[in-house]
């Protein structure tokens, strides 16, 4: 993964929803798109969160940047923003997540199967009941970016993240 993917975010290398008209939003409000994030007083926090997300994805080798294949369906991507609060309502973390716009894919053409391994609610209740009955210790594990790192059986091409196109390779894809 090229380290250059952590380019400075500028209006010149933004695309898609980030060109949407934005109204300046107040501090402490979750932006709906990149344009709102950039006009927010919290922009330095959102920008830092975006860089953290890109670093996490690069560190896991989520994609490689390649030349745009002729005739391939290129899935778009966009940023989502979320504020994490503590019990007092104080902001403790700014989270930016890169999401692929998979709705542009067609079943049987771009993919053949969808699958997300999740525990059923009933199974979770049974385990917690057994833990309570037997005085077992219960721990929780959170795996960051888990869905973006599954092995795929097909090749998916995604536009480079808005604001993070590699210099000199803006027409390449992930």
Image (tube, helix red, strand yellow):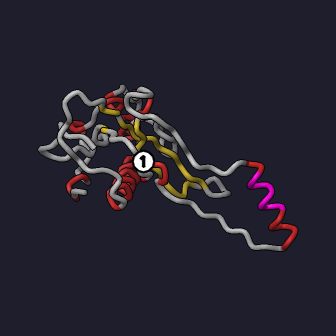
Residue at the far right: name it: 133
Residue that appears at 40% across and 38% down: 100
The image quarter in which residue 14 lies:
top left
Residue 104 sits inside the magenta stretch: no
Is 11 on the left-hand or right-hand side of 25?
left
Residue that appears at 41% across and 29% down: 23
Is 27 on the left-hand or right-hand side of 124?
left
The segment highlighted magenta reads 123-129
Q: Nearer the viewer, residue 151 or 100?
A: 151
| Residue 67 horizontal/vertical position (percent) | 17, 41
Residue that appears at 75% across and 53% down: 123
| Residue 26 horizontal/vertical position (percent) | 48, 39
| Residue 115 horizontal/vertical position (percent) | 54, 42
Quadrant of the snapshot with the N terminus = bottom left
Number of marks drawn: 1
Q: Nearer the viewer, residue 28 or 31?
A: 31
Residue 127 sits inside the magenta stretch: yes
Q: Is residue 19 above or below residue 82?
A: above
| Residue 140 horizontal/vertical position (percent) | 65, 64
Q: Which of 63 and 34 is in front in this view?
A: 63
Quadrant of the snapshot with the C terminus = top left
Q: For mark 1, give the secondary structure.
A: loop
Q: In this view, does 111 lie above or below 120?
A: above
Q: Categorize mark 1 by other alpha carbons within 10 Å: few (<14), some (14-19), many (20+).
A: some
Write down the residue under mark 1: 42
Prevalent SS, magenta region: helix
Is 3 on the left-hand or right-hand side of 124?
left
The image quarter in which residue 155 lies:
top left
Residue that appears at 49% across and 54% down: 146
């Amino acid at each position: 993964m090229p380290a250059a993917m952590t380019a400075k975010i500028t209006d010149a290398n933004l695309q898609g929803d980030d060109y949407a008209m934005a109204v300046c939003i107040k501090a402490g409000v979750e932006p709906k798109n990149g344009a709102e994030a950039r006009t927010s007083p919290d922009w330095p926090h959102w920008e830092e969160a975006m860089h953290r997300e890109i670093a996490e994805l690069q560190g896991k080798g989520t994609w490689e940047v390649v030349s745009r294949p002729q005739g391939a369906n290129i899935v778009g991507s966009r940023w989502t923003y979320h504020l994490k609060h503590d019990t007092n309502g104080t902001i403790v973390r700014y989270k930016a997540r890169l999401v692929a716009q998979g709705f542009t894919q067609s079943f049987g053409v771009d993919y053949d199967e969808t699958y997300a391994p999740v525990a059923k609610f009933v199974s979770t209740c049974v385990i917690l009941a057994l833990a309570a009955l037997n005085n077992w210790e219960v721990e929780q594990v959170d795996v960051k970016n888990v869905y973006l790192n599954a092995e795929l059986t097909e090749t998916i091409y995604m536009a480079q993240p808005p604001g993070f196109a590699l210099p000199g390779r803006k027409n390449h894809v992930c």
